[in-house]
Amino acid sequence: MGFDAFAYHVLGKETKKPIAKFPFNLQPNESVLIGIGVRFAVPWPYQCEVRPRSGLANKFDVELSNSPGTVDPDFRGEIGILLRNRGKNSFTIEKGMRVAQLIFSPVEIPVFEEVAELPPSRRGAGGFGSTGLVEIHEGTTEFEQQLRGQDIFYMQMAIAASNRSNCVRGCRKGADGRYLRDDKGRLIGQSRKFGCVIMNEDNVVSIGFNAQAPGQPLCSEVGCLREAENIPSGTQIERCRAIHAEWMAFNKMLTSGVGSSTKEATMYVTSEPCEICAKMIAGSGIETLVVLEGVYQQNGLEAVRAAGINVRFVRKEDVS
């Protein structure tokens, strides 16, 4: 959240004293220091950043020359906004015009430690622009190992959740027409079982698996609707009594009442999402989707990536 800063008077860049009245015409390729008529003491450990307004930049090509500017805790002078006209036309600044916004945030002062050698990273000594345009492979080897271990751990949890699925499509039946189960009560021949885990800040906030939606009859008792209607796999997804693992995970968050959020969370799924689930994921605020590689490939990853969501994979041999 930012506080709007309003033009109060025109200041000299050297003297910081008023030098002109409004309206003031800012010519192309010129800059001007606008005072906002306010001085304040920023309490430690906070800083105040002076940031540009997108409307001025987008409509008039008027920007901050020192973006962002910083108001340090020990500064006691009037806050000044250094505007530059990068457009082709002059820009008129009126008194009371919103010319910038002020953002307050806490800061930390690092403690430097002298070492004989820096920890290794993929980037190494590569300079500005050396990481490419698409993927940025940064971080130490240790960090990547920890991330891989985390992905394997939560993917195993998603696989465990998938074992609660009661989808009977393709399952074997006995002579009495009932679906066969092993000594642990698991359906024999079950191939359509999927799991989902949503993790935020190393805490599991929701778990889901594919199963009948509330109010729907159990397929283990009445049979598979999709098999009865001879619906090809991956088509007419809406013709099913079940909800997908991702749907269930989202539904549980909505009904739990614990206030969990998918914002910047990581979702683990045991197969690629379908197109419907992918659209739900795209609008959920989830930051990263981790997929079990090579299991029941569908068409959802394109929509997930288009939403700017990171996609990682876990190999099946790593969780077996």
Image (spheres, rainbow, N blue to C red):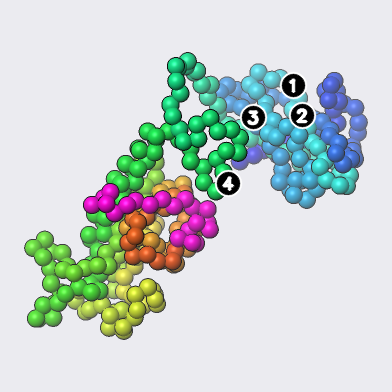
Which one is closest to the eye, mark 4 or mark 1?
A: 4
Residue occupied by mark 1: 77
Q: Are marks 4 and 1 in contact (CB under 8 Å)?
A: no
Q: Is residue 204 above or below residue 142?
A: below
Local crowd at mark 2 within 10 Å, few (<14), some, or many (≥20)? many
Q: If you read the primary sequence from the N terminus, does the residue marked by circle 4 or circle 2 appear first?
A: 2
How far separated are the C-alphas under marks 4 and 2? 36 Å
Residue occupied by mark 4: 133
Q: Nearer the viewer, residue 231 or 26?
A: 231
At label 3, the amino acid type is Cys
Q: If you read the primary sequence from the N terminus, does the residue marked by circle 3 or circle 1 appear first?
A: 3
- The disc at residue 48 is 3
How far separated are the C-alphas under marks 3 and 1? 13 Å
Q: Nearer the viewer, residue 68 or 308?
A: 308
Q: Is residue 37 left or right of residue 291?
A: right
The magenta region covers 301-320
Going 42% across and 48% down the picture, which residue do you hit? Answer: 265
How far separated are the C-alphas under marks 4 and 1? 41 Å
- Where disc 2 sits, the SS reads strand
Which one is closest to the eye, mark 3 or mark 4?
A: 4
Q: Is residue 317 magenta?
A: yes
